[in-house]
Amino acid sequence: MRVAIIIPRLDQLGPVKVIQSLVNSLDTATELQIKIFYLDKTVDPRIRMNVPAELLVRRRFCFQEYDIIHTNGIRPDLFAFLNHKKINYHISTIHNFVFDDLSFTYNKLFSWVFGNIWLLIWKRADKLVCLSETMKNYYLKWFSASKLEVIHNGISEIENSFILEDDIIHEITGLKARGLKLIGSAGILNKRKGYDQVFLALSEAKEFALIIFGNGNELSELQTLAKKMNLSNRCVFCGFKSYAVKYFQYLDFFVAPSRSEGFGLALVEAVQQKIPVICSDIEVFKELFNEEEVTFFRLNDTISLIQALYKCQKNGIMKAELAYRRYLNNYTNKLMAKRYYELYRLVC
């Protein structure tokens, strides 16, 4: 089986990290030959693939060399759409709820226009991989059940070679020295991630502090909000960190307050580290874990989030152990690789 996996760029994006985890788990299958192609010239050297990877040159791409073209993202999907007659079999992994994601990232008009264009592009694909049953049900409005396949994302064990930054450790120890319970979160800073909800909760629950890993178009607004609410001395913005998960060991809780999420990679990373998790009650999160494993709060309900913080203080550690078992049984890189390998074999 010869598979070309096409991604937008070799960068520290969630979907790219998932593909890295996938191919680094699949490369031991001797009958499977994988090659990564990326569209942008800029390469992050921290992305390490155990398979060949090269810049995709459109005019020179040899479609007949591959049994399967596996795309990830709108630009790779568009490339496959424009060349569909040359492709033996096209699989696209859907990483988002298209209209929700585009609406939060841009605006409703942009979402309607480009969301419908993306749906048209996907119609030419032979198989669409969804990250959850919730996502599959969402896309059943536009595609047949036979076209949709569910494969959960899986994550690898973290690297031990990563060196922690002294300034972040200093911030963490300073907050803990003041007797504050430390809440952590990680992700792109935009409205979809719902971080403003945590700020509202912290303004009432003064024994908690927040440390956020990530960048995004909401960064300045969130920093302004923290100052306005007098939270600057209990809220630390660390910026994007390649291995933010390495700092999770210092957290008392991890919070995932998302309003919409394709999967919830950072949430699973926190579970992998056995950190008690508090998350919004969106359908994707409720599918991934249950109330015995994480603590849910009602979306856009500050009182519910505050109550969740105190509940997590009481039984979060016990829940974290149960959530970790769920991770081992459902969300490892090896399980994800097994499912994709089965899909590749089926279509070949």
Image (cartoon, rainbow, N blue to C red):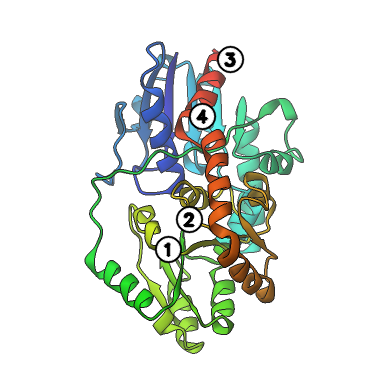
Mark found first going from the N terminus, 2 or 1: 1
Q: Amino acid at mark 1?
A: Leu
Measured from the top left, where is residue 137 in percent x and y? 73, 40
72, 118: nearer the viewer: 72
**Does 8 sit left or right of 136 as displayed?**
left
Q: Residues within 10 Å of mark 4 (few under 14, many from 20)?
A: many
Mark found first going from the N terminus, 4 or 3: 4
The numbered disc on residue 335 is 4
Mark found first going from the N terminus, 3 or 2: 2
The numbered disc on residue 275 is 2
Secondary element at tag 3? helix
Dot 2 and dot 1 residues touching (CB under 8 Å):
yes
The answer for how far apart the CA atoms under marks 4 and 3 are is 17 Å
Q: Residues within 10 Å of mark 3 (few under 14, many from 20)?
A: few
Give the residue number, with chain letter if any, for mark 1. Answer: 251
Measured from the top left, where is residue 18 in percent x and y? 44, 39
**Does 194 sit left or right of 1 as displayed?**
right
The image shows residue 34, relative to residue 74, as above or below, that is above
Give the residue number, with chain letter if any, for mark 3. Answer: 346
Q: Which residue is drawn at the image coordinates 43% and 79% (left, top)?
A: 223
